[in-house]
Image (tube, grey):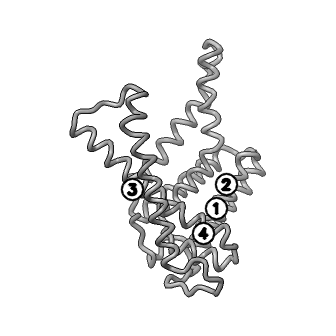
Amino acid sequence: MHVFIDNKFNPNPITKLFVVGLLGLTVAHVVNYYFEWLMIVLISAMYFIGNYKKEAIKNLIIFGVLFLAQNLNVMYGLPVIIKIFLSLIFVIRMFYLPFAAGAFFVKTSDVGSIISSMDVLRIPSAISIPVAVMFRYFPSFKEERKNIKLAMKIRGISVMNPFAYLEYVAVPLLIISSNISDDIAMAAETKCIENPIKKSRYIKVKVGLIDFIYGGLMLLFFVGGRLYA
């Protein structure tokens, strides 16, 4: 995960968690679509100034496709089965805002700053430790999956058959995931994770202007979206 801790344009994880929770409310509470676009543009702008230009463009394109698909009236003339299938687009559209904020949080945060932020918020270790393990686990899992597919491509093995996929991809991933879990557990024990005393953190969480801009604008857009919904 390529993250610059001292980047003054990168909000700290506390602000990002606040935005994820705030946008999670949009699933149950309708927000005006103009303000939805403002939220997406803001997330993409944060990607862009953080030098994640590809993610910024992809975020805008995905939401644009979901937004247009939601407004297509041609669906009313389609068969029921196709309507059910296309209704998944509406479900994805409902959850995209919190997903986009969560993706930005994961992409631009590292384990050290996240743990330090949770210490500041006095979040119990029963929650902070699983989150830290998750951030260590999934990038390694994704990298191993990529390596397996690359090895299969070199050997000319295709996984179009679902049974072949289970044999050549799923089974090795299960074994590798078990090894990754063991490695993370041993690393945690080496760092005395069970020691009840207060830990000293190398990374200090700071609140800067970008935190007020990112969190404040998101709160403003959410309130405005609810008022004009």
In the rendered image, the quadrant that contains the N terminus is bottom left
Q: CA distance from mark 1 to mark 2?
A: 6 Å
Callout 3 amino acid: Lys
Mark 1 = which residue? 19
Mark 4 = which residue? 129
Q: Residues within 10 Å of mark 4 (few under 14, many from 20)?
A: some
Q: Earlier in the sequence, mark 4 or mark 2?
A: 2
In this orientation, which residue lies closer to the viewer: 123 or 13? Answer: 123
Q: CA distance from mark 3 to mark 4?
A: 31 Å
Q: CA distance from mark 1 to mark 4?
A: 21 Å
**In this rendering, is residue 21 above or below 192?**
above
Image disc number at residue 23: 2
> Are the residues tagged 1 and 2 within 8 Å (C-beta)?
yes
Mark 3 = which residue? 53
**In this rendering, is residue 127 above or below 177?**
below
Point 49% across, 70% down: residue = 10
In this orientation, which residue lies closer to the viewer: 115 or 192? Answer: 192
